[in-house]
Image (cartoon, rainbow, N blue to C red):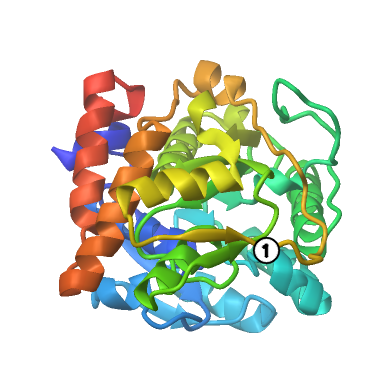
Amino acid sequence: MALSLFGGVYAGRRVLVTGHTGFKGSWLTLWLRQLGATVTGLALDPDTRPSHWTLLGFDEVADHRVDLRDAAAVRHVLDTQQPEIVFHLAAQPLVRRSYRAPADTFASNVTGLVNLLDAIRGCPSVRVLVNATTDKVYAEQDAPGGYIETDPLGGHDPYSASKACAELVTDSYRKSFFNAPDTPTRIASARAGNVIGGGDWAEDRLVPDLVREANAGHALRIRNPSAVRPWQHVLEPLSGYLRLAQMLWDDRRFAGAWNFGPRADGEISVGALAAQLSANWPALRIEHDAGVHPHEAAILRLNCDKARTQLAWQPVWNIATTLARTADWYRQFHASEKLQSADDLATYIDDAKHLGLAWTA
């Protein structure tokens, strides 16, 4: 049954996932394997222990530990694997780390992307590239209805700015090298909101930090509790990426930029999210850290009307379900070291089918 999802486009298809050892990349690999794809991964070693990727134990995935900043190594992977679809998730993804290491952040997120795009130019097997960026690519401005894809790009911190640069690079390569009707490759970028879910142990992220402190018997001191973010389960943007690539496979008119964010109930403050998550797991306790911290945007909202109307995509889980599934994942893992990931994916797909979403047909 799962092979019929997304029109069956992934069954037997050669798919490259960059950043497969990371949080989102490991979940995407899990889903692609269920869809029957032959998956190749290109990434650095996981930078957390434990890591979701290691725990999943996918021996059948061609696992290339390659730095995107090494152009020759990137080209070698594409030349030998000849992928048909590429999902680019590899990045330095942390805002606060970008303040500590701005040069590395720009090198990974911009130069690494250029190396990948150049490798794709020389790899005629690639038909679709989806470049995953972030909601933080937008220049900060008053946008009560949420940022739309045509809003100005910007970025105060190095991470956000590097991802805005990545959007410009993607658009430039699309127009310069992949725009002719006889060019086989179609390129799109996907801008997703904050993702949560089981299997994330990254530093300076709210849910992993809460889990770590709870297991140590401590309260988490949170910064910027009033900052509003579009919170969503990790499977939500991944369904958007998969749907976007499916549509691009058949029609290059879907090239361009796309927002993938939660329902309105998912646009809540950091403090509210921490409090609601604590309601699902009483061991999670929070305190306000009133210290001085690097700048982060006060409000981020995404307008996803384009994806809803043109891709027939929409979120599946509300914030209550998202938080409950996330808390359950970590509770089960810490009680028995068993992964709930496959069960979460199966439940998500069933719930999407009950909504009658187009990609489940």
Mark 1 = which residue? 289
Left or right of 214 in this view: 308: right
Taking depth in this image into account, of 283 and 42 the one nearest to the observer is 283
Quarter of the image where one finds residue 37 = bottom left
- The answer to whether residue 28 is seen in the rendering is yes
Is 43 rendered above or below residue 34?
below
Question: Residue at (55%, 79%) from the top-left corner?
Answer: 76
Image location (x, y in percent) of residue 297: 77, 47
Left or right of 320 in this view: 156: right
Question: Residue at (18%, 51%) from the top-left corner?
Answer: 343
Taking depth in this image into account, of 341 and 177 the one nearest to the observer is 341
Q: How many numbered marks appear?
A: 1
Dot 1, crowdedness within 10 Å: few (<14), some or many (≥20)? few
Taking depth in this image into account, of 183 and 39 the one nearest to the observer is 39
Image location (x, y in percent) of residue 117: 67, 60
- The answer to whether residue 184 is seen in the rendering is no
Image quadrant holding the N terminus, namely top left
Is 272 rendered above or below residue 336?
above
Image location (x, y in percent) of residue 235: 38, 45
Question: Residue at (65%, 82%) from the top-left corner?
Answer: 72
Q: Secondary structure at mark 1?
A: loop
Question: Residue at (77%, 74%) from the top-left corner?
Answer: 107
Image quadrant holding the C terminus, namely top left
Left or right of 190 in this view: 138: right
Which amino acid type is shown beneath numbered disc 1?
Asp
Image location (x, y in percent) of residue 64: 45, 80
Quarter of the image where one finds residue 54 = bottom left
Left or right of 3 in this view: 217: right
